[in-house]
Every structure is written in structure tokens, then in C-alpha cells.
Image (tube, grey):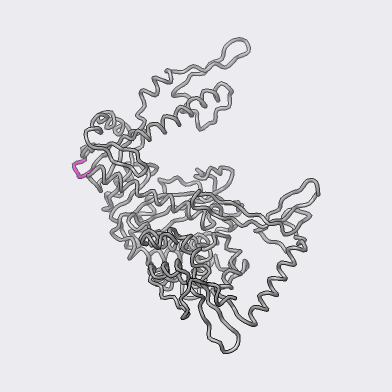
Amino acid sequence: MINKDFKYVWEERRGIYRVVTDTPEYRPDTKKTIHHYVTIGKAKEKNGPVEFGPKHLALQEARKASVKEEVKAKTVIPSGEKLVMDKAVTDTGLSKALDKTLGKDLTAKVVSLAYFLLATGEALSNSEVWLQERELSPLNAARISELLPQISEEKCSLFFREWLKTKAKGKTICYDITSVSTYAKDMDLGEYGYNRDHERWLKQINLAFVTDKQTHMPLAYRVVNGSLSDVNTLKDTVREFIQYGATPYGMVMDRGFWGQERLQMLTDEGIKYMIPVPSSVSWGKKIISDNKSNVFLQPPHEDDDGSKTYGCTVYDPNGEGRHVWAHVYYSPAIETLKKEKFVEKYTKCRQDLLDGTLEESQTDFAAKYFTVSTRGRGGKRHVEEKAHLVDVLARQDFGYWVLYTDMEKDWVTALDDYRDRGFIEAGFDDLKGATDAKRLRVHYSKSVFGHIFIQFVSQILRTYLRGKAKSFDEGTQKFASSPSSILTRVRSYSKVKYSGRYKAQFTQATKGQRLIFKALGIDAEQPENDEDSTEALLN
């Protein structure tokens, strides 16, 4: 038996491959994924047949026997997670949009797999048992491989058209792009490019992601080739929104999408924008130079981390004759951080020049601050600073930056609005860390759209639960303050079916479960006994 999710670890002493399973666990508190490895057997060659160990075989047989024996008397069906996620599918309007565009059968399978991703974060190929236990649409690895190509790019577009009609039209949206690495060699979309996870040795695809600024709800994504830069995706995304009949009110973007022609394109389409001005833009530098003192004329903005940001506003900085503002900001905390990074880069560049190990990407930086010559018969390398580092630092505008927008004239409100886009980065973290999307496990382009679409649906449900958790009262938040804690808390709530003519019953909900169900508006069935015990029916 060969399984692509098995890991083969070479053991030199024994001359064999030790075969292990990997169960990743995402930790929201540390934003890191830890791996739990369990040895299940050995193999003579990498990716070859596995000779399972007696312990693993015995465990599998015991599980099968236990399940068969249990079914004869009673069947326990974990129901709490499904109840919560069913509510999310209904409240978000996902069920209606999916049924209309994918059909009921395909929708049931997509939703089941999205539930699995949200609850476990594991690879889709591991979902069969989990889905069977919850009476959802069970799919083994082979059936999933057949399913993914059915969710084509065309079907995804149909869904986005339906979803965006009610979710995006006239809204302020946030736009960003992330890269997803892949080991696949035969994927047309996979190319080498700027990898945001710093995995430059792997090919990647890029995901252009659009999110509702106010509700943080994922709206749409576009799968693009891994070598395309951020700026090349914006025009096509805007065009798609317009074709879907969902032209947004405004777009909040990172400085990577800067470009006067792109901003003019948004203006021509009647879309407002908010974007930082890159430090290389000359008029942005001049505005900072002219307003270094003006930013201190008003009370500072109190940041969430306790630091302060100072600011002021310049109306129509380029004389365009329209309502557009350049908000100038200064942050002591940012100045300290940027100065520290600059000094580190500067000193490393100087040392790399001396060692002759300078990377090609640092050539322009080196030429700006250093001159290199050789001396003596041995041609010893000599590096000279064009100016002392102290003088270089004095000329920098560390801590100052400009936010350019035709959406908001108040610098404080604009700052909050822009910083609020940070949730999209958190969404990328969720997508990669909590829904098994950091590296694509599919190997063909025709399966990419389906795999990512299921992760996208899962992310919609996660966003819904995150919003609900924030709205919980203090008493409920003691038991559940995040999507993962909600699902963990309700996991033990189960439906018990008995053989014969006995009526199925539900286990008694704990206090935390009752509070969560009530807060979400879920009418969970309860036995007459009202004590805090989920064990009554199971024992």
C-alpha cells in the first residue's frame, strides 16, 4: 500500500526507510504549526510499499472490531461541530449560492470537505473516517482526486458572480496577494517567483484575494501564475468584478500595487482607493520633507499596542483638482524598527562586499552606499563608504510615511481604515496554517481550482465564526473566544443511535455548549436531565 501522505525517513544504521504519519496541529496563539509523527512501518525504498508494523496492524484491526461491535448496540455520532458549521453555512448564504452554481450533490461534497478542513486543518485525503463518523458525505482519497477537477475555474466563476452580487457591490474591499508553494512538477500554473513564505527553491502559484473590509468576509480569489507580480493582477480583478455586476465602492491596497496608471484606472471605473505611497516616489518624499514638523501640531493617535502615531493631511497634493488627500504619518516605533533593519542590511552589505559574496538582489543598494576597489599585487578588496553611516541615517525619513486616498479626508480615520486591512494577512495565516494550504498537495492544474475553492469555503465559515466569537458576551467568551475554541468546545456533543426500535437521543450539553448554541441561535435537542454531563448516555 502506497500513500502520498506517508513520510519516508532514511535510517542509515538500519539501511531502511522508517515510514511515519504526520498530523499537523496549528497553534493560533503562536501562529505556528507543530507536527506529531507516528511510526507505522518500514520500507526498502523511498515512496515504496510499506511493511506495516504489528502495533499499527493490531490497532487498525482493533478499531475495525470496535466499530463493528459498537454499531450492534449503539452508534455515537459527533454532532456539535456539524450543528455549528451548518448554522454558518445557512447564515452566510453559502448554501444558497453553492446550490445554485454547483448543484446539490457537488455542494454537499464541497461543504463536507470544508467542514473537515475547518475542524481539523488536515489534508483532504485524511477526511474519510472523520466524515463517516459525522454522517457527512464520505470521500476517500481516490474519490477526492476525482472530485477536485469537477470544481472547474468556470464553476468557481459562476459562484463568485452569485456570491458577489450580495456581498461586494458598493462595499469597500481589501485586495492583496499571497503565494502558495507546490512540489508539483507538472502544474502549468506553478512557476518560480517572489515567494512570500521565503521558499524560493519551490515553485508557486499566486492567489489574488479580495475581502470585505467591514465584515472581513472573503469575497473572491483569482489563481494566477506564480511568476506574475502583484501589480499585474489588479486590472484583471477589477475587470472581473465589473463583469460580475459587483463594482465595489473602494479598494484598500498595499504599496505593492502602487502605480499612477492603476490608480487612474480605478478612478475611471468610479472606484475609490486607499494606498501607501512607496518611499521611492519623489513627490511623496517632498511631502514628508515639507511636513516633518506639521505632524506634531495635533494630538497623536493612540495605537493598539500602546505606541503613538502622529499625522497631518495635505489636500490634493498633485494639483489634480479633485477631492484627494495625502495623509502624512510619523511613528517613533516604526522609526526604531526601520532604522534597526537598515543598519543590519547596511553592515551585512559591507561585509558581503569584502567577502565577495554579495547577492545580485543587493547590487543597487551596495552601489548607492559603497565603492569597491582592489589594492596591492594581490588585488585585495577594499570597500569604502560614500558617506558615514551616521550621516546616512540622518538623511533617512525613518518612521515617516504617506497614505494616499480619495476615500477619507481625516488622517485618524484613514489610519484606522488602512490598519484594519491587517485582517487579510491574518486570513492568509488561517488559510495556510489552519486549512492545509501552505503547500498545495495536488499535482495537476485541473485540480488546483477545486482544492483552493474548498479551502476558500472553509475560510468563509471560519470568518463567520470569528465574527460571532467577538460578539459573544463575557460569560460565553470564557468557553469560546475563537473559531477553533468554539468547535473544540462543542465536539463532544453527540447523537446516540440504538439498535432496534429505540429512539435516537442527544448527549447532555455542558454549560459551555449550551451558551455557545444559544449565542449562535442553534436549537440543540436536549434530554430531560439538565445536569452538566455529556457522559450520561455514553456510559
12 with respect to 78 (left or right): right
Residue at the image position 30 percent from the left and 44 percent from the top: 415
Assign the N terminus to one quadrant of the image.
bottom right
Q: Where in the figure is residue 143, as x and y percent of width and height?
A: 60, 69
- 404 over 158 or under it: above or below: above
Q: What span is colored magenta in the figure?
A: 320-324
Q: Where in the figure is residue 524, as x and y percent of width and height?
A: 44, 75
Residue at the image position 50 percent from the left and 25 percent from the top: 347
- 6 over 68 or under it: above or below: above
265 with respect to 256 (left or right): left
Q: Where in the figure is residue 265, as x and y percent of width and height?
A: 31, 48
Assign the C terminus to one quadrant of the image.
bottom right
164 with respect to 138 (left or right): left
Foreground residue among 242 and 478:
478
Secondary structure mostly taken by the magenta-highlighted segment of the chain:
loop
Query: Residue 260 lies in what quarter of the image?
Result: top left
**Magenta run includes residue 253:** no
